[in-house]
Amino acid sequence: MTMKRDQALRVLSQHYPDGIVVPVYQSAFDWMGIRPHPLNYLCTGAMGQGSSHALGLALACPTEPVVVLDGDGSLLMNLGTLVTIGDQSPRNLWHFVCQNGMYEVNGEFPVPGKSTVDFAAMAMAAGYKAAHTFSDLNEFSCALPSILATPGPLLVALQVEAGAPFPRNYQEIHSAQSRAAFKAALAGRRGR
């Protein structure tokens, strides 16, 4: 059984209402519709770099929780980030990978190894503290509070398919206003 991505992200938004989120590509468009928030760090133009950006934020802001909403195609373009995250071991980083087997926003081309890749096993081999894979929404929903209470780095592979369509608002993702809002919100949280 496979869950809808928007349903999984809605569940996450209920349990993670106010922290930093680094959403990439289709997850970014979904997340902007589900949880518009100034602490959404939008970096869609850097395919494969979402997890690296999230690591930088987690290390620079160790008291702030950081979630990265990665895609399977995006993570495959930067697998070395798993080792770097494992080595740096930020306790405040939770890495969610929306695994749908395709480069969705780039023409729905299949990703290599879509039927065999095991991101949870890769994360554990790279030094993550824990890793999980879910394809059932109810199981994910029940496990999520415990996952978010567990110190990271932790990876969750979400086996998903497209759900409700959200507008692909590239203008907002690339806007100076989005970057300024994130910077101001983060400075406000850190008392600067």
Image (cartoon, rainbow, N blue to C red):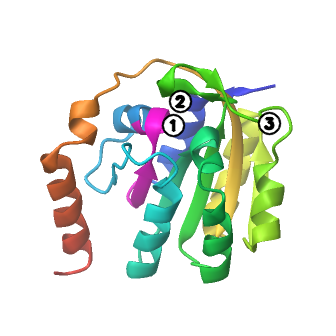
Q: Looking at the picture, does residue 9 appear above or below residue 190?
A: above
Earlier residue among tags 1 and 3: 1
Between label 3 and label 2, give the one nearer the viewer. 3
**Where is residue 57 shown, x and y percent of the image?**
40, 70
Residue under the point 45% across and 18% down: 165
Between label 2 and label 1, give the one nearer the viewer. 2
Is residue 104 at all visible to an observer of this figure? yes
Residue under the point 34% across and 21% down: 167
**Where is residue 76 shown, x and y percent of the image?**
65, 47
Residue under the point 59% across and 55% down: 78
Is residue 152 at all visible to an observer of this figure? no
Q: Is 92 positioned to the left or the right of 180 in the image? A: right
- Cβ atoms under marks 2 and 1 closer than 8 Å: yes
Q: Looking at the picture, does residue 116 appear above or below residue 187?
A: above
- Cβ atoms under marks 1 and 3 closer than 8 Å: no
Kind of residue indicated by mark 2: Asp
Earlier residue among tags 3 and 2: 2
Q: Looking at the picture, does residue 40 appear above or below residue 110?
A: below
Kind of residue indicated by mark 1: Arg
Q: Which residue is mark 2?
A: 6
Residue 125, image quadrant: bottom right
- Cβ atoms under marks 3 and 2 closer than 8 Å: no
Which residue range is magenta in the image? 17-28
* Residue 95 covered by magenta stretch: no
Disc on res. 10: 1
Q: Which residue is mark 3?
A: 113
Along the viewing direction, whichever of 186 and 117 lies nearer the viewer: 117
Alpha carbon distance from label 3 to label 2: 24 Å
Along the viewing direction, whichever of 181 and 84 lies nearer the viewer: 84
Kind of residue indicated by mark 3: Gly
